[in-house]
Amino acid sequence: MTETETRADIVIVGASHAGSEAATRIRQGGFTGSIALLGAEPYLPYQRPPLSKAFLAGETSVDNLLIRSAESYAKAKIAFHPSTQVETIDRAAHRLHLASGNWFDYGRLVLATGGRPRRLTIPGSDLKGLHYMRAIADVDALRPDFTEGKRLVIVGGGYIGLEVAAVAVKHGLDVEIVEFAPRVLARVAGPELSAFYEAAHKTAGVKLRLSTGVDGFEASATDSNHVGAVRCGDGTILPADLVLVAVGLVPNTELAALAGLDMGNGIKVDEYGQTSDPDILAVGDCVEFPLPFLGGARIRLESVPSAVEIARAAASLINGAPKPYNLVPWFWSDQYNLKLQSVGLSQGHDQVIIRPPRSPEGFIAFYMKNGIMIAADCVNSVLEFNAAKRFITDKLVLDTAALANPEVVLKTLIPA
């Protein structure tokens, strides 16, 4: 193949929330040089959270997933290159080598490579009918079998698994979740919230098999290349027409590691997204950065708001007006008619306050440490979530009895 050369002053690898935000903010900040955004998929940057919810349910289209329109990138003079896979970085030459055989030169580079689903390598994991969920193509592959009456087994009781279960049971599938931990959401939520969602899913007809591992997948009796059952660690065989594996995310750090950048639990960056190479920044789910909320302790977060915020910090550095990452982490999940909004990180709490919700389908848990709120989980409770964000951001010492009393209006606990 004949190599062709392309160059931009700023090259962003990864057409993600973070990549799109970085490109846009760099331009909005007054940068006048050339900007190129390289995406491995054939699509413009799009929202991934709806994939396991409204997009899977057929309630929204690809066009509605797009973060920004093609016209907005063109107007900002951001050149978008779809279906472009970067294989290596030549830091000395400031050059990216592409899978196509071409190369792309950069002045400064921003890595927004995101992550990919953690894959199982147990017996039968190469059978057809096993699915993962991270991209539009994953949903497209799942849809033909995602029909009423089909038996769906979901391996993993985290947010993705639960969100897909909620859509599937609503569409008439027979759904069973197999989770190795003793409760759903064990990695990200307290026992109280786990119990709330377990009850909601059981009420909807989802079967839960907790404290259960998966040893392998067995082929269908009618098609030796297609999954027909899930073999659990306790010997139970669960018939399955299709399987979704949702057991976490692996950050895409190989490109950075191969280039010799400093690594931790992700690409190591500072509060501006700066890597160990002065001409390379990194943003999004693939980075490990110092979190002010944790006193500067380093962490990797899988969160759209966090990805967007670190992208803004990187753009501010490029534009010469540095503004560090300083966001209190927050997350959300939609299951059935239950909207979960979480803020903060509950690790290390010494008290949980359950506040009675204002509606029967609500749930509120506040996580305290030394009388200060460090996290909150709020379901269908937006007023409480907004108040909790303020409490946590300002590190207020709070009256725990007032927090637990539904008669107390939370905003009155915020000093004037």
Image (tube, rainbow, N blue to C red):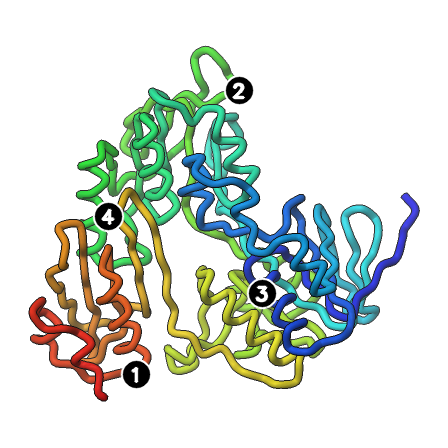
Q: Nearer the viewer, residue 2 or 220?
A: 2
Q: Earlier in the sequence, mark 1 or mark 4?
A: 4
Labelled disc at residue 394? 1
Q: Are marks 2 and 4 in contact (CB under 8 Å)?
A: no
Hey, what amino acid is under mark 4? Arg
Residue 297 placement (x, y as % from top left):
42, 77
Q: Nearer the viewer, residue 63 or 200?
A: 63
Q: Residue at the spot x=20%, y=76% of the render?
A: 411
Q: Are marks 1 and 2 in contact (CB under 8 Å)?
A: no
Q: Nearer the viewer, residue 47 or 306?
A: 47
Quote the CA–CA distance across marks 1 and 2.
Answer: 56 Å
Q: Which residue is mark 4?
A: 183
Q: Are marks 1 and 4 in contact (CB under 8 Å)?
A: no
Q: Which residue is mark 2?
A: 225
Q: Earlier in the sequence, mark 2 or mark 4?
A: 4
Quote the CA–CA distance across marks 4 and 3.
Answer: 35 Å
